[in-house]
Image (spheres, helix red, strand yellow):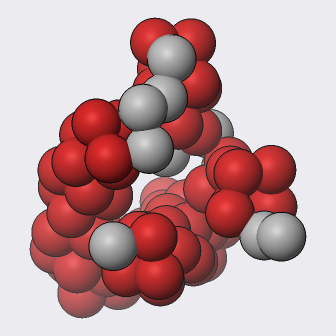
Amino acid sequence: MKKTFRIISVLEGVSYLLLLFIATPIKYLTGVDSYVKLLGMPHGLLFIAYVILAIVLKYQLEWKSKTFVTVLVASIIPFGTFYIDKKHFRN
């Protein structure tokens, strides 16, 4: 489960960065919103998977509430999922 979470975490982080720093500026600078539509759905699905897996891991790894909240908040901060991967999952 940890390996799956790490993969989803990285994919969610990359999709968020692409959406935030590439698709959104293109939308507002050129008016073309197709990149936001293209990246939005996969990012949303990865975000939901990230949260669900975080809930499962909270109980499997017996995370304290503070750790769990940190993991959840990291999903809405750019580069946050990479920080969580480094801090909690790399040995």
Q: Position of residue 68 (x, y in %)?
A: 46, 27
Depth check: give the residue in front, 3 or 48: 3
Above or below, 31 against 62 in this view is below
Q: Nearer the viewer, residue 32 or 19?
A: 19
In x, y percent, where is residue 78? 67, 50
Q: Is residue 23 visible?
A: no
- Confirm whether residue 59 shows in the render: yes
Q: Is residue 44 above or below residue 56?
A: below
The correct choice, above or below, for 27 with respect to 7 in the image is above
Residue 35: % across, % down: 35, 84
User: How many circles with numbers are drawn on the protein?
Assistant: 0
The picture places residue 25, in percent across and down from the top left corner, at 58, 65
Quarter the C terminus occupies: bottom right
Indicate the quadrant containing the N terminus: top left, top right, bottom left or bottom right: bottom left
Q: Is residue 88 above or below residue 17?
A: above
Q: Residue at x 53, y 37 (%)?
A: 71
Work out whether residue 82 or residue 78 is closer to the camera in this orientation and state it.
82
**Rendered residue at 23%/79% (across/down):** 42
Residue at 21%, 63% (x, y): give it. 49
Q: List the single residue furthest toward the top.
A: 65
Q: Going 44% across and 44% down the picture, which residue do you hit?
A: 61
